[in-house]
Amino acid sequence: MRSPSPVRLKETWVLCFILGIIMLNYPFLEIFNKPVTLFGIPLLVLYLTFGWLFSIFVIFLFSRYLGSVSAESDNHSGDAE
């Protein structure tokens, strides 16, 4: 497996950041800012909580993928010597 280029990694992190900003911007906040509760918790609070948890999970998966790619490329470079 080829290791991703630094430019590609930077683009991916920027994309994650932009998606996070969009998630916290007007249209999405307005959609979930309703006088509705689920299990006694306002919908907006649930949206922000689960959106935050989902963002952390995506970043975790991405960084784990980077770690496995890096470890694999280190193993392959060690085999060539």
Image (cartoon, rainbow, N blue to C red):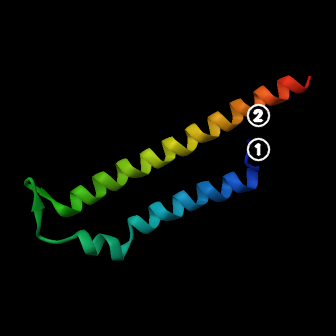
Q: Which mark is residue 2?
A: 1
Q: Amino acid at mark 2?
A: Ser
Please give left or right for residue 55 compared with residue 42 in the image. right
* x 48%, y 63%: residue: 19
Q: Residue at x 73, y 48 (%)?
A: 4
Residue beneath the point at 28% across and 52% down: 49
Neighbours of disc 2 within 10 Å: few (<14), some (14-19), many (20+): some
Of residue 76 and residue 45, the one placed in the foreground of this image is 76
* 71 or 12, nearer to the observer: 71
Q: Residues within 10 Å of mark 1 (few under 14, many from 20)?
A: few
Callout 1–callout 2 Cβ contact below 8 Å: yes
Query: Percent from the top left, x then y, of residue 51?
Result: 35, 56
Residue 73, numbered label: 2
Whichever of labels 1 and 2 marks the residue nearer the N terminus, that label is: 1
Does 57 appear above or below 36? above
Helix, strand or loop at label 2? It is helix
The quadrant of the rendering that contains the C terminus is top right
Amino acid of disc 1? Arg
